[in-house]
Image (spheres, helix red, strand yellow):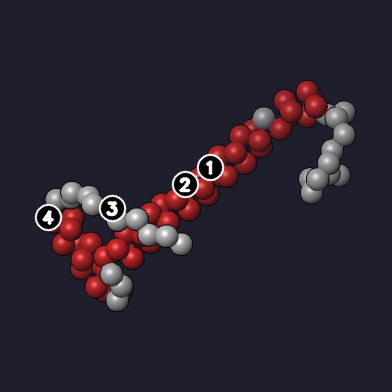
Amino acid sequence: MAKTQLNVRVEEATAETARERASQRGISVNRYIEELVRQDEGENGRAFVQAAADFMKRYEAVFEEEFGDAPRTGEGAR
């Protein structure tokens, strides 16, 4: 995977915390930041899937009423 240099300005306390946390994990600050972004991205994905599942559960009766006779395909087919 190609790397891109990113220059960001943060408060000194934030930079020091990032250095300390990276050091505690035995990784570079760059790697630490990459992991934080990936973790955040994963959390957003999980939140989206959970919200979609909650939506479908909440409106299941409405969908069933509207599309109940529609043929089902895919893994969710009954």
Between discs 1 and 4, the one toward the N terminus: 4
Crowding at mark 4 (Cα within 10 Å: few <14, some 14-19, many 20+): few
What's the distance in space between the residues labelled 1 and 3, CA to CA? 27 Å
Identity of the amino acid at label 3? Leu
Question: Which mark lies nearer to you, 3 or 2?
Answer: 3
What's the distance in space between the residues labelled 4 and 2, CA to CA? 28 Å
- 77 displayed left or right of 44: right
Q: Name which residue lies at 46% across and 62% down.
A: 1
Task: Tell me the quarter of the picture where residue 55 sits.
Answer: top right
Between discs 1 and 3, the one toward the N terminus: 3
- Residue 65, horizontal then vertical, whole percent: 79, 24
Q: Name which residue lies at 57% across and 44% down.
A: 49
Between discs 4 and 3, the one toward the N terminus: 3
Mark 1 lies on a secondary structure that is helix
Question: Which mark lies nearer to you, 4 or 2?
Answer: 4
Question: Which mark lies nearer to you, 1 or 4?
Answer: 4
Q: Which mark is residue 44?
A: 2
What's the distance in space between the residues labelled 1 and 4, CA to CA? 33 Å
Per the image, the residue denoted by label 1 is 48
The residue positioned farthest toward the bottom in the image shown: 26
- Determine if residue 36 is in view: no
Q: Nearer the viewer, residue 46 or 10?
A: 10
Per the image, the residue denoted by label 4 is 12
What's the distance in space between the residues labelled 3 and 2, CA to CA? 22 Å
Crowding at mark 3 (Cα within 10 Å: few <14, some 14-19, many 20+): few
Identity of the amino acid at label 4? Glu
Q: Quadrant of the C terminus?
A: top right
Identity of the amino acid at label 1? Phe
**77 up-or-down from 18: above or below:** above
Per the image, the residue denoted by label 3 is 6
What's the distance in space between the residues labelled 4 and 3, CA to CA? 17 Å
Mark 2 lies on a secondary structure that is helix
